[in-house]
Amino acid sequence: MADPQELLGLAEDVARRAGALLRDGLARPRLAVDTKSTGTDMVTEMDRAAEALIVDGLLGIRRDDGMLGEEGTDRAGTSGVRWVVDPLDGTTNYLYRMAGFGVSIAAEVDGVITVGVVYDIVHDELFAATRGGGATRDGAPITVSAQEDLASALVGTGFAYDADRRRRQAEVLVTVLPRIRDIRRLGAAAVDLCSVACGRLDGYYERGLAAWDLAAGGLIATEAGATVSGFTVGPASAAGVVAAAPGIADELRGLVHGAGAADA
Ligand code: IPD
Ligand code: CA
Ligand code: CA
């Protein structure tokens, strides 16, 4: 039986080491860049180098674990533990040297996300959670905002890389934006979820997240007291994520669903 605290300690160490590698990469004058699903979906040599470091760091110590990583790692294990990894969430920001990127590492135990770590490289902040154990930033407990008024809520969102989906997502925003305080599009979903967890955002919604975008940040937000769901009832998934302070969660979910987010 895997000890969540042991998994957490390992994930924290490896996330910090990957973060240091990525920080060093910012000093390179030029980064090799390829595109993936669309011309706007980029991957740099540093995304791949960070994933390689994380694979070595986790599986070097826990040889029987499985792993799913955004940059191609897909390995079945035998221990019941599977790591779900986004080695660099916020690649576009990273490439443009804009704030808003980090490392996301989650551990599933027997299919249940049990440990989550997001290292926000720009702020040098480490967000962490274990299922049922609460959420922390640099070791101190964090909680969601006390916001109860949707009209006064600061809400994050994100856009997919597919052009048609982006157009529909912009149409959803036309309905959502006049009903809230303002919108933020940071460009790093895992960091957005941690921003909800610590009250920097009152809420966040997005459609089209991959497992590695959602796994760690979703647990951290939940453990910080956020209501995390899909656009209607049911769990958050690629089909839709709403993470919000409980005081606005139902209303925000209703707003984005009514605006057509599930079809965007
Ligand atoms: C992306 C970012 C972005 C979100 C996209 C993700 P990447 O991840 O998290 O904020 O809107 O849905 O794909 O490509 O930078 O790892
Ligand atoms: Ca990502
Ligand atoms: Ca990524």
Image (tube, grey):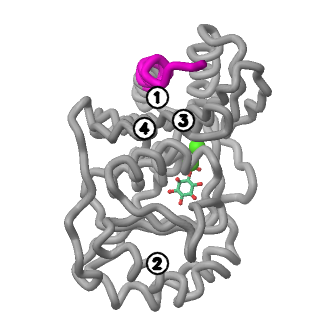
Residue depicted at 69% across the width and 67% down the height: 162
- The residue identified by callout 2 is 253
**In this rendering, is residue 185 above or below 153?**
above
User: What span is colored magenta in the figure?
Assistant: 1-15
Q: Amino acid at mark 3?
A: Ala
Sort mark 3 into few (<14), some (14-19) or many (20+) by Cα contacts within 10 Å. many
Disc nearer the start of the sequence (1/4): 1
Q: Amino acid at mark 2?
A: Arg
246 in the magenta segment: no
Q: Nearer the viewer, mark 3 or mark 4?
A: 3
Majority secondary structure of magenta residues: helix
Residue 69 got which mark?
none
Marks 3,1: beta carbons within 8 A: no
Disc nearer the start of the sequence (3/2): 3
Residue 263 image position (x, y, % from top left):
67, 81
- The residue identified by callout 4 is 118
Q: Nearer the viewer, mark 1 or mark 4?
A: 4
Q: Locate residue 200 relative to residue 92 in the image: left or right.
A: left
Q: CA distance from mark 2 to mark 4?
A: 25 Å
Helix, strand or loop for disc 1: helix
Q: Amino acid at mark 1?
A: Leu
- The residue identified by callout 3 is 106
